[in-house]
Image (cartoon, rainbow, N blue to C red):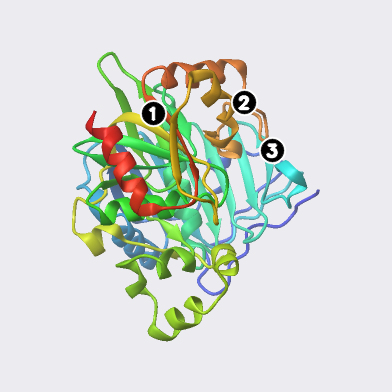
Amino acid sequence: MRCRRGAHAGGRGAPAVQSGAAVSPASLIRGVAAPHTLSLSFADVPIRVRTNDPDIRMRLASYFRPYVIADGAAPLAEVSLIQGTVPVDGTFVDVVRDGGRRPKEATQDVPGGRLVLKRMTGVLIGLWPGGAFAAGDIGANLNQGVNLVNNCYAKVVMGRGHVLLHASAVSLDQRTAALAGPPGAGKSTSALHLVEAGFRCLSNDRVLAKPMPDMVEALGYPKQPRVNPGTLVGHPRLCALLAAADRAALAALPAGELWELERKSDVDLDGIYGDGTVELRGQMAALVLLRWQRGGQGLRVRPLAIEEALDALPLVYKNLGAFDLDRAPGSPMSDAERDRYAKLYSRVALVEVTGGIDFAALVGVVKSLLST
């Protein structure tokens, strides 16, 4: 499709930046003042955020509270979040999704980087080595700013040889178990029940892992869990985040309907359980593949051979998609990538959980895996 308009924001807008076709991403925001800065450090990866909106800076500082640092360390990536319009010319190509699902993004490769248009929100993202911007109504779509910061952090870490897992993860005495599975398997819900049982949360939905000489390093994403009402209403502590009337209405829904209900809420684990509940760094000891079912009988656990686990790799494999300048948007997993996951799998325990969903029983399974 042809796109000749920018990421439009209402109300508080940045000055329009004039552009022509095939300009570099960095040049699109060169004329926009972004005086409000925030320095962050995730697992010793320093990131600097700039914005033209003090409210965005304040909200990000609250969201990333445990990771705010004093200015000083040279950032490995710099992210600008612009509240306002950045007009851009050129042809954007939709990124094809599996199963014929509606495209969420369209991209345009330009000199020095890439532009990504978020279809639902109109937010425009620019990427170049070591830098990125998001422009549009960021105030109303702060999660896209959070995601961009996380993508820049992950790109730095993956440049060091880590692979990305589509998994949640928890730690016990710094030994980490990653929890993966098909969509709707309850990865995030499982992690929250494990946190309630005394585990630390390493990550809600993405894990970066790399075999080292003496252990497998696991790094989490500094992103609060975003969960649906079914997760909250069935949790002994987090149900209190719902209003009493909402809890009653949700509890009255059929189990299947509640499970499928999509209405995301952020969960600040450090705020609820205390500082230190989220630990971004651990030593990966196990990968648990959740293949249990609602309505299944009992909980069954069996070890997986490496080849069996690799057969299920599409459930675990993840890349940065359009946000990785080193790959074409929508490109499939390569043989070299598969080999890197095989090396990871050779260093950790691999287990499959089947039968019925039983979070209490899973606590015992994961505790046993991390205690051996």
Residue 293 in the image, given as x and y percentages of width and height: 55, 50
Residue bearing the label numbered 2: 333
Residue 104 in the image, given as x and y percentages of width and height: 67, 51
Q: Relative to 261, is 21 above or below?
A: above
Q: Earlier in the sequence, mark 3 or mark 1?
A: 3
How many other residues sit within 10 Å of disc 2, few (<14), some (14-19) or many (≥20)?
few
Residue 68 appears anywhere in the view: no
Residue bearing the label numbered 3: 22
| Cα distance in 3D space between marks 1 and 2 | 17 Å
For image coordinates 39% across by 81% down, the residue present is: 243
Q: Earlier in the sequence, mark 2 or mark 3?
A: 3
**Element type at marker 1?**
strand
Pointer 2 and pointer 3: residues touching (CB < 8 Å)?
Answer: no
* Quarter placement of the C terminus: top left
For image coordinates 57% across by 41% down, the residue present is: 25
Q: Quadrant of residue 244?
A: bottom left
Q: Nearer the viewer, mark 3 or mark 1?
A: 1
**Outermost residue, front direction?**
297
Q: Quadrant of residue 169?
A: top left
Residue 130 in the image, given as x and y percentages of width and height: 44, 33
For image coordinates 71% across by 41% down, the residue present is: 98
Q: Nearer the viewer, mark 2 or mark 3?
A: 2
Residue bearing the label numbered 1: 209
- 278 left or right of 258 in image: left
**Element type at marker 2?**
loop
Task: Name the kind of residue labelled 3 in the image.
Answer: Ala
